[in-house]
Image: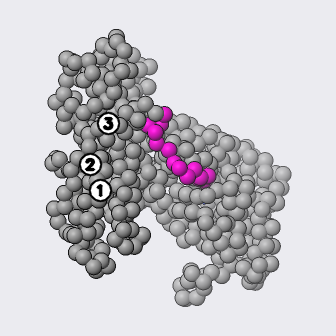
Amino acid sequence: MNIQKFLTKKIKKICTKYNIPKSFDPIIRKNIKKNEIDYQVNGIIKLKNKIPSSSYQLAVNIANDLIKSNVYEKISVPQQGFINITLQSDWLCKYINKMYNKKNFNIFTKNPQTIIIDYSSPNIAKDMHVGHLRSTILGDVTARLMEFLGHTVIRQNHIGDWGIQFGIVITQLQQMSHISLEKIEKIYKQANLRYQTDPRFVKKTETNVVNLQKKNKDCLKIWNLLVKHTIQKNNLIYKKLNISLTNQDIRGESFYNFMLSEIITDLKKKKIAVNHKGSIIVYLNQFKNRLGKKMGVVIQKKDGAFLYVTTDIACIKYRCNVLKANRIIYYIDNRQKQHIQQVWEIAKLAQYIPNNILLEHHTFGMILGKNNKPFKTRHGKTIKLIDLLNKGINKAKKIIIKKHPNMNNYEINSIAQNIGIGAIKYFDLSKNRISNYVFNWDQMLSLNGNTAPYIQYAYTRIHSVINNADLSFNTKIYSIKIFSKFERQLILTILQFEEIVFYLEKYGTPHLMCKYLYDLAGQFSKFYENCSIIFAKEKHIKVSRIKLSILTAKIIKKGLYLLGIKTVKKM
Ligand code: ARG
């Protein structure tokens, strides 16, 4: 039950009786203060100038209307435009039992869509670095969440496998007698240096880009080796990071090559693109260049080479026409904001995408070091993602060995993997994605506070409660009921899961899921400390409380699953 949505609907319906515009959205939040109020309605005061009576009177009228149904225990109107709501315990129990008994906690979308999620998308011939962490894990959370809600999710790893960087590497490799892919990073760096300093190298590179795009055999051979090698390496990272991307999700830039010439011709025909001194350019009204004139976006260079933007135009066309996307969410660096907006604009002008398509760029901030500058190694170098992950796992290992000196290696490694990776992911996801954050090992591995280890530990504790329960009788006849204010609070929090999930569906804000899980774990602790669970004397109380514990554990597990984090049985 999404209580927030339920109340919004009810109040909006009542509002129509008082001629309040349909666009009015009351602000409805679960109350976090300890008093007896479950939900608070706010925002009615904003209607002050639009209604004949006072906003206080309107709030009173709404409250009087609401109370007629048997959902509410108590409703009060303490101030202008404020309504305090206490829900009936029986009503809460009805929905908590539904949540306990039904598949997926009875949570699903009523409007299933085809949603494409463009995430991770590293470039070939380069190791994934710390900068890829956010685009990879944020995108993965959205993919998992949309799937959980019943949408058709198409993951797309738009790897950079087609641009100038290939020309550069291919040119360098052509000049070497022996190709060693192990050293590809080094080769790439050397090649880049030559590209910046040697005009002959630049010429050859440009020819190679065109040749590759024309599917020249020699170029393709080197290209294939490079792509395979990088994908293999990246897959190790995805596996370690528990990312749900597979090779089937790879649709790199190269995939759209077959569409590019046709798109250029079509854009010229539609008079969207023009030939300017041999280059094909689209001039866009909305974007101005430094001189304040319409910005020109080059979609084909003089030598015939296509660009990153051309591929993305083809890509969005393909996603709409062939994959039938209703919504596309891009997890790409903020610095590519203008790039993607230009792609969307050109695709709209050319009518490659339907009018009602939802296009979103979910931006994210940077990861900073302790000095508040971009996170680098001590020597100022880019941090490789694999090194960062291994460091996290090793740190977790040390903590576990200290706690369990006699644990066997296999168990240590498996737990350390889940704790170390969980800590890194959760720390990132618990920050609002649009802000930068400072990377801090001690904080993320701490057992206190809003961290993965804290939540994972809470899960193991609930598990041991459940495992120690003696339930050698028919438990089916007993349902979850409310016997104290502690379980009432816990039930309210569990019911809030649906609200959080739908908020994430709309806005892609995993930090709210983290905050929620932290709150839920805290509510469970209070319940555990104040109520007898397995030692409850009466059977019906015992079963109700154990079922509530099971449901809490399931929600924590699912919440962590949606964040791409595994639980552990022992810590
Ligand atoms: N490969 C690009 C990069 O590393 C990101 C691609 C993002 N997706 C897209 N459709 N352009 O910067």
The secondary structure type at the circle numbered 2 is: strand
Work out how far the residue at label 2 is from the one at label 3, CA to CA, in angstroms.
Answer: 13 Å
Disc 3 crowd, CA 10 A, few/some/many (<14, 14-19, 20+): some
Residue 66 circle label: 1
Is residue 539 shown left or right of residue 251? Answer: left
Work out how far the residue at label 3 is from the one at label 1, CA to CA, in angstroms.
Answer: 20 Å
Question: Mark 1 CB in 8 Å range of ligand 1?
Answer: no
- Give 179 or 264, whichever is nearer the viewer: 264
Q: Position of residue 517 (x, y in %)?
A: 33, 41
Q: How is the image coloured?
A: one colour
Residue 156 circle label: none
Question: Mark 3 CB in 8 Å range of ligand 1?
Answer: no
Residue 93 circle label: 3
Q: Is residue 521 above or below residue 189?
A: above
Residue 405 occupies quadrant = top left
Residue 387 highlighted magenta (yes or no): no
- Give 189 or 531, whichever is nearer the viewer: 531
Residue annotated with mark 2: 72
Instruction: Identify the residue at the far top of this view.
Output: 472
Circle 3: residue type = Cys
Q: Which residues are magenta?
A: 103-116
Disc on the earlier residue, 3 or 1: 1
Circle 1: residue type = Leu
